């Protein structure tokens, strides 16, 4: 399957257009819940201290600091225990018990540290304050969460690979779950006989397997569930092999016990776990914005000097714009300082730049060797098209100096697009940058990109950023 070359049929395209924006991730539910709980429990603990400490010993600001500390501990404990998950919050007894357990240690700590007038009045003050806070927020949260789930705001947008009886069994099982957050948008199946009808329990079949990757590229689908029987082992393995290029979670209905699909689906899917989960996306985005702003603040004189040098040397625009592959193979417009003569610019990357290329200006050669030509991509980072660190984005039809397309040299090359592309990356700091004149160079770059994707952490990003200036001292392969 090649998601780039397949044109979606009308039904699949129509559905894809309805899910171009992602649903609210469970991470945002956690953030909102913590943002509500911290001030609520701060007030509860403050009033508890106010009611249990003698007026002569009560210091409002000290009590506020102690109350806030206790409230943060409560919120952290609830988050760590998974109490902010929709499944727990939807169950009032489970949410109440988790909250009571979370307030126990901070509450006892405040009782021991504060100069309370007496144990009896203190217990009464703490019990009443916390009871009001817990009951009001938990009953309110349950009602709001039911509305949020019913409207699909935090739903996992899902499509099914495989139809017929297995798909029907899957749909029934999912709909029978309490607090179900899975919403089905379509079925993809190659069979066109009685084994796979055009519609299964209200979910329409909108394409075959060859349409599936193109559909995931074009939409904001969160989950693909393979609904095929054990006997279709060869077909399941084929689908899993094809899905390795997608930044989407994959589930196997035959390996799910409760149709929750929240544990990765067992050993078959360990290598297909979602590579860019919501918490990773949020952390990486904050990291990118902070460090991109710092970099612009430090490097603006270099960028200004580069722009002036380009303008003085040759006619044409200062910036060069090129369409490249972004996250999930989506097309993005990348900015660079122009390093070629304007009339020789190659936005389609039809000819790779080689040593002594006459199209490159003198200023451009220096900019390319030093990677200063990449600095305008800091604006791409702020716009959200790029990350500071990630696999380098290649042109839409990137090819080697032997005119071989990258996708022909390396099978499954688009698997490197499971994370947002970056200005620098693991491959670049390890020397794999510049001209591709041999297949093994691209294979090595691809292997380094996959290593980065599978081992991503914010600390790895920081390490790559710190090592990037030193890697630029070697101009190997950069012309």
Image (cartoon, rainbow, N blue to C red):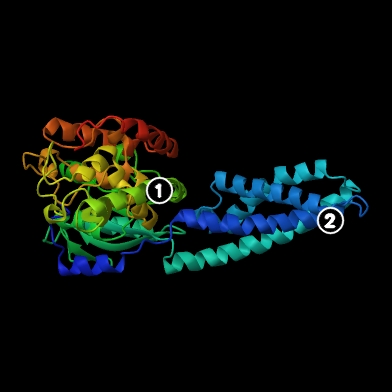
Q: Position of residue 390 (x, y in %)?
A: 32, 42
Task: Count residues near mark 2 (Cα–Cα under 10 Å), then give few for <14, some for 14-19, many for 20+.
Answer: many
- Residue at the spot 17% in from the left edge and 43% down from the top edge: 238
The residue that appears at 80% across and 54% down in the rendered structure is 48
* x and y, in percent, of residue 392 in the image: 26, 43
Q: Is residue 33 above or below residue 77?
A: below
* Viewer-nearest residue: 268 or 470: 470
**What residue is drawn where x is 28% and y is 66%?**
201
| Of 130 and 440, the residue lying toward us | 440
Upstream in sequence: badge 2 or badge 1 = 2
x, y percentage for residue 105?
Answer: 71, 42
Front position in the image: 123 or 352:
352
Give left or right: position of 317 versus 155. Answer: left
For the C terminus, the image quarter is top left
Where on the picture, by quarter, is residue 156? bottom left
Please tell me whether mark 2 sits on a helix, a strand or a loop: helix
For disc 2, the marked residue is: 50
Q: Which mark is residue 19?
A: none
Relative to 413, is 250 on the left or the right? right
Count of picture labels = 2
> Is residue 204 visible in this depiction of the protein?
yes
Q: CA distance from mark 2 to mark 1?
A: 56 Å
Q: As drawn, which residue projects farthest toward the front?
A: 312
Instruction: Answer above or below: position of 368 versus 63.
Output: above
On the image, the x and y values in percent for residue 218 come to 24, 60
Residue 23, image quadrant? bottom left
Q: Determine which of the numbered discs, if any, sits on residue 301 in the image.
A: 1
59, 131: nearer the viewer: 59
User: Image point 32% across, 54% down: which residue?
Assistant: 385
Q: Residue furthest right?
A: 56
């Amino acid at each position: 399957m090649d998601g780039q070359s397949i044109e979606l049929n009308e039904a699949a395209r129509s559905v894809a257009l309805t899910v171009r924006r992602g649903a609210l991730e469970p991470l945002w539910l956690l953030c909102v819940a913590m943002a509500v709980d911290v001030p609520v429990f701060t007030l509860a603990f403050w009033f508890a201290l106010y009611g249990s400490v003698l007026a002569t010993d009560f210091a409002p600001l000290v009590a506020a600091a102690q109350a806030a500390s206790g409230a943060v501990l409560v919120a952290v404990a609830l988050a760590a225990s998974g109490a902010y998950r929709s499944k727990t919050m939807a169950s009032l007894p489970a949410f109440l018990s988790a909250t009571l357990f979370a307030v126990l240690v901070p509450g006892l700590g405040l009782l021991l540290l504060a100069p309370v007038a007496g144990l009896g009045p203190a217990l009464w003050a703490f019990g009443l304050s916390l009871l009001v806070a817990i009951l009001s927020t938990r009953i309110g949260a349950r009602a709001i969460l039911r509305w949020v789930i019913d409207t699909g705001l935090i739903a996992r947008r899902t499509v099914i690979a495989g139809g017929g009886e297995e798909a029907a069994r899957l749909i029934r099982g999912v709909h029978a779950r309490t607090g179900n957050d899975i919403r089905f948008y379509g079925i993809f199946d190659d069979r066109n006989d009685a084994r796979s009808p055009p519609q299964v329990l209200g979910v329409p079949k909108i394409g075959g397997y060859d349409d599936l990757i193109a559909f995931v590229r074009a939409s904001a689908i969160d989950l693909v569930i393979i609904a095929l029987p054990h006997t279709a082992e060869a077909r399941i393995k084929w689908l899993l092999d094809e899905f390795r290029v997608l930044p989407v979670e994959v589930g196997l209905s035959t390996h799910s016990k409760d149709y929750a699909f929240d544990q990765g689906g067992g050993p078959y899917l360990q290598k297909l776990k979602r590579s860019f989960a919501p918490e990773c996306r949020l952390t990486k985005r904050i990291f990118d914005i902070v460090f991109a702003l710092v970099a612009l603040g430090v490097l603006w004189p270099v960028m200004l000097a580069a722009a002036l040098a380009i303008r003085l040397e040759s006619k044409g625009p200062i910036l060069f714009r090129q369409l490249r592959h972004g996250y999930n193979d989506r097309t993005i417009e990348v900015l660079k300082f122009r390093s070629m003569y304007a009339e020789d610019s190659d936005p389609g990357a039809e000819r790779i730049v080689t040593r002594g290329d006459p199209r490159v200006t003198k200023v451009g050669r220096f900019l390319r060797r030093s990677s200063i030509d990449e600095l305008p991509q800091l604006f791409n980072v702020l716009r959200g098209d790029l990350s500071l660190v990630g696999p380098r984005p290649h042109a839409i039809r990137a090819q080697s100096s032997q005119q071989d397309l990258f996708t022909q040299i390396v099978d499954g090359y688009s698997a490197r697009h499971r994370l947002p592309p970056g200005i620098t990356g693991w491959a670049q700091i390890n020397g794999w940058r510049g001209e591709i004149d041999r297949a093994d160079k691209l294979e090595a770059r691809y292997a380094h990109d996959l290593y980065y994707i599978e081992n991503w952490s914010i600390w790895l990003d920081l390490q790559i950023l710190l090592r990037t200036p030193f890697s630029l001292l070697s101009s190997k392969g950069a012309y």
